[in-house]
Image (spheres, rainbow, N blue to C red):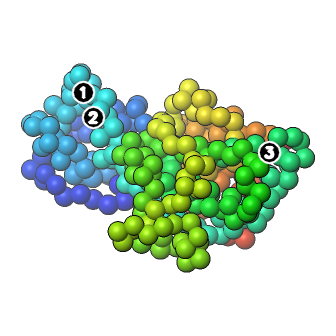
Amino acid sequence: MSLFSKSITLGKEFKISDEEFSQLRDFIYDKSGIYIADNRKYLLENRLANRIKLLNLKSFGEYYYYLQYDPRKQQELNKLFEAVTTNETSFYRNPPQLKIFQDKVLPEVLDAIKSKGPKTLRIWSAGCSTGEEPYTLGIILHEVLKSEIGQWNIRITANDLSEAVLLSARRGVYTEYSLRTTPREIVSRYFTGEDGKYRIVPEVKQLISFGQINLSDKAQCKRVERSHVVFCRNVIIYFDDEVKKRVISSFYDNLLAGGYLFIGHSESLHNITRAFRPIHHPGAIIYRKEA
């Protein structure tokens, strides 16, 4: 999930006052944990102006009132989340991290599971956007386990704040652009052509369970099944320090002993927590919950 990576220029006739900006900024923070800095005021104005027009409202103040009191406020909250987040992603994004996962972390985790008992693997993709990350992880599992995958009980829990992106993720149909960083042999093995687009094969799709979640809500995070590996890449940079600590604490609680956390290559747990042990690899740092 990435916030305000593009600007929409719809409805420029709507102007947001300082008071309205503060009200909406605080509302968004309270509902999602996403913090919008003062210098992002014009982007919030651009993003929400179209919603105001579609709802036949006259101002940002009326929109704020609508979000609080209208009977359809829950449906609009999903539209709000969709408006203030932009999901720029692709399959096999950040190859150095995924190579470490495929060559180092996953084999170690699988061996540890096999040595203890039932072949049950749980992975959490938190902030999954339109599904490219969890499906990539499912493909990697097939690549590593090959014919043995049928002997495993595997679930990848994939969550995002936006219902709109989750709807797209559940469809599992992608453009060439989404596959721009994907090896061509992977595309041929795990996708079928469909009207100029690419559909993920059922063998991968069945590994993924999609659902909406607000990562800043610890109670919601507690409902996620305990995981061996958590991926949350390019998400926490949009939270302030307080919410970052809460979210990372939820990941720590969710991970089983010895589990691994993957965050974005430009993100860091420095000054957030010392609970994880950082493990340095070429091109990436991975975080481990010590046993």
Against 77, is 36 above or below?
A: below
The Cα atoms of the two marked residues, 2 and 1, are separated by: 6 Å
First-in-chain label (3 vs 1): 1
Looking at the picture, which amino acid does disc 1 mark? Arg
Do we see residue 58 in this rendering?
A: yes
Residue farthest toward the bottom in the current orientation of the protein: 184
Q: Which residue is drawn at 44% across and 69% down?
A: 193
Local crowd size for mark 1, using a 10 Å CA cut-off: few (<14), some (14–19), many (≥20): few
Q: Nearer the viewer, mark 2 or mark 3?
A: 3
Q: Which residue is drawn at 45% across and 49% down?
A: 170
The Cα atoms of the two marked residues, 3 and 1, are separated by: 45 Å
The residue beneath circle 2 is 76
Looking at the picture, which amino acid does disc 2 mark? Glu
The residue beneath circle 3 is 119
Q: Residue at x 56, y 66 (%)?
A: 190
- The percent coordinates of residue 17 (x first, y second) are 18, 40
The residue beneath circle 1 is 72
